[in-house]
Image (spheres, grey):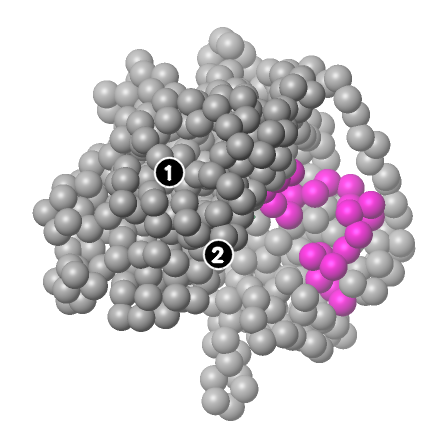
Amino acid sequence: MSEKMRTLTEPFKIKVVEPLRVTTEEYRKKVLQEAGYNTFLLHSKDVFIDLLTDSGTGAMSDKQWAGIMVGDESYAGAKSWENLDAVVKELTGMPYVLPTHQGRAAERILYGILGGKGKVFISNTHFDTTRANIEFTGATAIDIINEEAEDTEVDLPFKGNIDIEKLEELIAQYGKENVAAIIITVTNNSSGGQPVSMANVEALRKVCNTHQIPMVIDGCRIAENAYFIKHREKGFENKTCQDIAKQMLRLGDAFVMSAKKDGMVNMGGLLTVKDEELSVKCKNLLIISEGFTTYGGLAGRDMEALAIGLTEVFDEDYLHYRIRSTAYLGEKLRAKGVPVVWPIGGHAVYIDAKKLYSHIPLHEYPGQALVCDLYIKGGIRTAEIGSLMFGKYDEQGKLIPATNELVRLAIPRRVYTQSHIDYVLDIFDDILELKNQKRGYRITYEPPFLRHFTARLEKID
Ligand code: F0G
């Protein structure tokens, strides 16, 4: 694809379509109220553009659908497993590959073995399910993102990097024998889909070698991360994204992947390890909780589609379109005056609702207010990553707000066209025009854990 091309075009044409239903604002107001102003509780038939997540929401290619037809459903030693095993071994360079039903199953198995009371895991940022699986074993999870990356506006190429200096301090503080693993999440979902540089992972490898601590790569967006390295890190300009990903994965001792992202499938996960003894322990847990070692939590057809998806995701035209189309939305929003996390990450655009809705106090959830407005105005479903998701209460029942009040517009892979994204941009004009009239929300029901999924709210008039 020519770099000079002005209009960013999708490098595919559409063979199967799924109709979208256009609803009225009146209707959306009604159904959102019925859903307790929680977009997780909406029916997808009532959503026009669904930017809730990029996980499992991508479109498969014709080759992947053809793979579905030839999937081998044998319980043991299926051909589809052999295909997947070969692709993953080639990608990671790791000899032991375990298929799981999704990313968190791989996490549960690996961290269930490495974790336990008194153990510490250190990461650039643990994704919620990663943290939950670690804490469930009684271990502690500590995030050490580079300090400069905490500024949501500073323009740096690798804001996903782990802070190596702080890492050394923490290892000294806790004692290397208590550090169960260092987890590097690429790209770093929880900090805006920001990439991690090869230099940072190499430096991390050295620290892990010195202290004999295992290094885990959470690489569900490894291809997107490789694209950023190719375009931002010196010395990688002439390498393919696939070779960059291979180089990075060879630095790890284990790899966990939610295949629902860069695996380009709707369901699936992977766990790969270098160490034989660890692989035996993992396989035992896999058999108890997921399935036999040659299918784990997956059907043969799923493994066939994943083997193809893991190859397609490294197509240079696809990756260029993927990263540039996410940036297209983010850059246009920024030009309109919408405060966005900068630079734009790989899979999503994050809006700073604390800045956009600065008139709404934090205990009235400005992020959720924006999520509701985007749905009411345009039928656009997004997710709050702020005090509704991470807020806690003090002893007086007062909200301790989250660090940021973000709204994530996650882009499904190969699903929406540029005109869908232009529509989203148009809706932001309405939001900006009326923003000072927007009001906050209060919670009327919340469960004890992960409240954002099922909480109910009401509008403050
Ligand atoms: N690690 C990262 C970095 C993730 O982003 C996710 C999922 C997981 C692990 C867990 O994988 O869902 O297959 O069990 N992220 C999704 C999201 C849910 O919307 O960002 P899973």
**Residue at x-position 63% and y-position 16%:** 63
Which portion, as a residue range, is magenta?
36-57
Residue 283 lies in the magenta stretch: no
Q: Main secondary structure of the magenta part?
A: loop
The residue that disc 2 covers is 129
**Residue at x-position 59% and y-position 57%:** 384
Q: Which quadrant holds the C terminus?
A: bottom right
> For disc 2, does the CB lie below 8 Å from ligand 1?
yes
Residue 37 lies in the magenta stretch: yes
Q: Residues within 10 Å of mark 1 (few under 14, many from 20)?
A: many
Q: Nearer the viewer, mark 1 or mark 2?
A: 1
The residue that disc 1 covers is 272
Nearer the observer, 366 or 97: 97
Is residue 363 visible from the viewing direction of this image? Answer: yes
Q: Position of residue 80 (x, y in %)?
A: 55, 24
Q: Residues within 10 Å of mark 2 (few under 14, many from 20)?
A: some
